[in-house]
Image: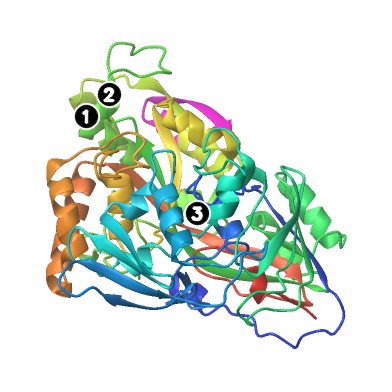
C-alpha cells in the first residue's frame, strides 16, 4: 500500500564535516524554474528545494508550518488567516512580507498560470499587516491549507524588476531560468536538459537539512545510460530505476534500492468532446469514444495482471478509481474495476455499431512514468486483440502537455497524484467540466463533463461530516465509473537506487527533497 512509502525514511547516520557534492539523475528535466508556470510533479518537486510556500509537507506527508507559522479559520466569513514567519529573506537578501504572498497569489491565479485551479475557492486575498494575510473563500473550505502545499512564494520586487510579473507557460521569461526563493537551496547554474546546480542558502531560516553543499541534477532519459552512470560512480542517486534492473542494483556491493508506492494513479483518458477521431483510417466522421460502451470495451480489453507480470515486474496494484486505496475519500463502495474480458469488449463494440472495430490514435509519453512506452505498447496490443487498432505515438514529456492542451489525441496516457492527499483533488482537476472562469477542470484534457459531478464538487469541498462527505464522493466515483470517464490502470511504484553511503527520505508523492539527503 502507498502508506508503506510514508514510512520509508532512511535514518541519517550523521553529518560529515567536509563539503559534500551530491549528484543525482532523473528521467525528466524540470522544464521551467517558474513555480507558477507548469503544474507537473518534476517541476514542483525540484522547485520545492528552492522556493517555499505558506505550508509544506513533512517526511510523513503531514502539513506543517513553513513561511506561515500558523493558520486559523476567519471569524464571521469563510476562509483562513495565515500568520507569517518574520525575519525570512529571499536568496538576494530582500525581506519576505505579506505583499510577496499577495503578489504570488495574483500571479499564480492568473490565466497565464498552470496552477490557478488551486485557488478556485478563493474570492479575495487581503493583507492585514506585514506578517498577516487573509484568504477569503466562497464557502467553508477545510482542505484549503492542504491544497496550497505547493504554492510557492516569489519576491514581488525581483519579479517586477526582471519583467516576470506573470508566468510564461509556453514561452520564456526571466523566471524560466532564474530563481529567487526563500528555500534551503539556491540556483547556482542552469543548462536546461544538461545540468542544473544548486548550493545551500546560508540564510535559510530552518535547520532541518542534511550535509549536501552542492547538488547537481543531470537528466538522463535512457534507462540503461542512467543505470550505468550509477554503477560506475558518476552519480550518487537515480530515480526511477528500470524495474528490470532492480535485482542487478541490489546484487552489487556499495548500492541499495528503496521501494515504495507512489500516490499516483496511471490511467488512460479520452477526447470526450471530440466530434471525430484525429488518427483513424476507417472512422472519419465520428468519435466512437463518445459512447460509454466503447470506453467500457477499452477497459475490458486491458489485462492488468499481464501488464504487471510482463511490463511492471510484479510491482503494481490495479486501480479502480483516480486515487489509490488509503487516500482520504477513497471509495470502498466502488473498489471493483472492469475485469479483463475480451469477449465482452467485442460484444460492447458490436452493440455500439463497431462490430469490426476501428482504428484510433493513442498518445503516450516515453520518459515521464515508469515503463510508460512499454505500457502503451502492451495496451495497444491488447486493444488490437478486440478490434481496436491503436496508432501509437510516444513523445518526450517536454512536448506532451502542449499536444494534449491542443487536443491532439484520441486517447492519451496520464498519471495523477492528489496534491492534497484527498479524492477531491482529481475531481477538481480531472473530472469537473473545464471552466476557466472558475479555475476548474484545468487538466481535464478531453473535457469529460457531467452536471451532477460539477454540482457535487462544491458540496464535497464544504462538507464537514465525514460520513456525509464520503457518500458524496462515492456518488461521483459511481457516476464516473459507469460512464468510464477514464480507465484507471494501476498505482505507480516508487523505485529509487543510490550508493549505500547516501541517506534519503522517500515520500509518497515522489518529491525528492535535498534537505533530507546526507552523504556519509
Q: Which quadrant, please, contains the C terminus?
A: bottom right
- The residue nearer to you, when weighing 300 against 76, is 76
Contact (Cβ within 8 Å) of mark 2 with mark 1? yes
Q: Residue at the spot x=32%, y=46% of the render?
A: 430
- What residue lies at 13% left-to-right and 64% top-to-bottom? 471
Marks 3 and 1: in contact by CB < 8 Å? no
Crowdedness of circle 3 by 10 Å Cα count: few (<14), some, many (20+)?
some
Q: Tell which circle, 3 or 2, labels the residue nearer the N-terminal end.
A: 2
Estimate how packed mark 1 is, as few (under 14), some (14 to 19) or many (20 or more) residues with alpha carbons within 10 Å. Answer: some
Q: Which residue is denoted by mark 2 in the rendering? A: 288
Residue 401 spot, x, y in % from top left: 49, 36
Which quarter of the rendering shows the N terminus? bottom left
Observer-nearest of 302 and 196: 196
Q: Which of marks 3 and 2 is in front?
A: 2
- Answer whether residue 179 is magenta in the image: no
- Picture quadrant of residue 320: bottom left
Relative to 69, is 215 on the left or the right? right
Q: Give the range drawn in magenta.
A: 382-395
Circle 3 sits on which residue? 308
Q: In the image, is 398 to the left or to the right of 450?
A: right
Determine whether the residue tagged by mark 1 lies in a helix, strand or loop: loop
* Image location of residue 121, percent across then percent down: 25, 55
Image spot of residue 36 (x, y percent): 49, 49
Dot 1 or dot 3: first in sequence order is: 1
In the rendered image, which residue does mark 1 sit on? 291
Amino acid at each position: 500500500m502507498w502508506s508503506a512509502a510514508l514510512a520509508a525514511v532512511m535514518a541519517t547516520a550523521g553529518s560529515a564535516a567536509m563539503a559534500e557534492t551530491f549528484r543525482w539523475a532523473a528521467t525528466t528535466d524540470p522544464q521551467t524554474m517558474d513555480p507558477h508556470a507548469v503544474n507537473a510533479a518534476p517541476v514542483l518537486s525540484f522547485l520545492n528545494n528552492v522556493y517555499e510556500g505558506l505550508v509544506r509537507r513533512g517526511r510523513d506527508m503531514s502539513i506543517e508550518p513553513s513561511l506561515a507559522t500558523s493558520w486559523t479559520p476567519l471569524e464571521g466569513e469563510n476562509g483562513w488567516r495565515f500568520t507569517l514567519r518574520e525575519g525570512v529573506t529571499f536568496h538576494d537578501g530582500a525581506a519576505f512580507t505579506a505583499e510577496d504572498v499577495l503578489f504570488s497569489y495574483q500571479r499564480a491565479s492568473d490565466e497565464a498560470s498552470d496552477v490557478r485551479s488551486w485557488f478556485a475557492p478563493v474570492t479575495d486575498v487581503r493583507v492585514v499587516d506585514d506578517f498577516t494575510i487573509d484568504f477569503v473563500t466562497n464557502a467553508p473550505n477545510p482542505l484549503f491549507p492542504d491544497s496550497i502545499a505547493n504554492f510557492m512564494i516569489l519576491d514581488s520586487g525581483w519579479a517586477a524588476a526582471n519583467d516576470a510579473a506573470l508566468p510564461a507557460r509556453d514561452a520564456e521569461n526571466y523566471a524560466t531560468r532564474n530563481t529567487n526563493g526563500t528555500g534551503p537551496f539556491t540556483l547556482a547554474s542552469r543548462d536546461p536538459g544538461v545540468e542544473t546546480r544548486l548550493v545551500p542558502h546560508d540564510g535559510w531560516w530552518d535547520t532541518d537539512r542534511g550535509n549536501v553543499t552542492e547538488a547537481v541534477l543531470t537528466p538522463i532519459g535512457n534507462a540503461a545510460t542512467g543505470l550505468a552512470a550509477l554503477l560506475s560512480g558518476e552519480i550518487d542517486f537515480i530515480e526511477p530505476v528500470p524495474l528490470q534492473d532492480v535485482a542487478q542494483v541490489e546484487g552489487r556491493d556499495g548500492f541499495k534500492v528503496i521501494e515504495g508506492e507512489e500516490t499516483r494513479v496511471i490511467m488512460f483518458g479520452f477526447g470526450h468532446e471530440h466530434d471525430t477521431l484525429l488518427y483513424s483510417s476507417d472512422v472519419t466522421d465520428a468519435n466512437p469514444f463518445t459512447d460509454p460502451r466503447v470506453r467500457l470495451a477499452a477497459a475490458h480489453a486491458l489485462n492488468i495482471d499481464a501488464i504487471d507480470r510482463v511490463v511492471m515486474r510484479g510491482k503494481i496494484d490495479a486501480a479502480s478509481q483516480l486515487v489509490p486505496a488509503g487516500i482520504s475519500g477513497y471509495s470502498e463502495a466502488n473498489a471493483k474495476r472492469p475485469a479483463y474480458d475480451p469477449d465482452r469488449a467485442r460484444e460492447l463494440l458490436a452493440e455500439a455499431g463497431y462490430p469490426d472495430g476501428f482504428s484510433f490514435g493513442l498518445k503516450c509519453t516515453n520518459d515521464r512514468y515508469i515503463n510508460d512506452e512499454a505500457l502503451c505498447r502492451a495496451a495497444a496490443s491488447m486493444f488490437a486483440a478486440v478490434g481496436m487498432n491503436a496508432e501509437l505515438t510516444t513523445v518526450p514529456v517536454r512536448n506532451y502537455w502542449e499536444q494534449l492542451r491542443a487536443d491532439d489525441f484520441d486517447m492519451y496516457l496520464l498519471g495523477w497524484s492528489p496534491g492534497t492527499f484527498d479524492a477531491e483533488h482529481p475531481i477538481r482537476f480531472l473530472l469537473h467540466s473545464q471552466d476557466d472562469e472558475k479555475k476548474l477542470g484545468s487538466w481535464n484534457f478531453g473535457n469529460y463533463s457531467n452536471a451532477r459531478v460539477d454540482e457535487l464538487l462544491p458540496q464535497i469541498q464544504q462538507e464537514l461530516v465525514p460520513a456525509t462527505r464520503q457518500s458524496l464522493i462515492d456518488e461521483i466515483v459511481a457516476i464516473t465509473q459507469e460512464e468510464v470517464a477514464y480507465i484507471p490502470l494501476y498505482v505507480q511504484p516508487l523505485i529509487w537506487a543510490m550508493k549505500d553511503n547516501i541517506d534519503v527520505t522517500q515520500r509518497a508523492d515522489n518529491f525528492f527533497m535535498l534537505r533530507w539527503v546526507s552523504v556519509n
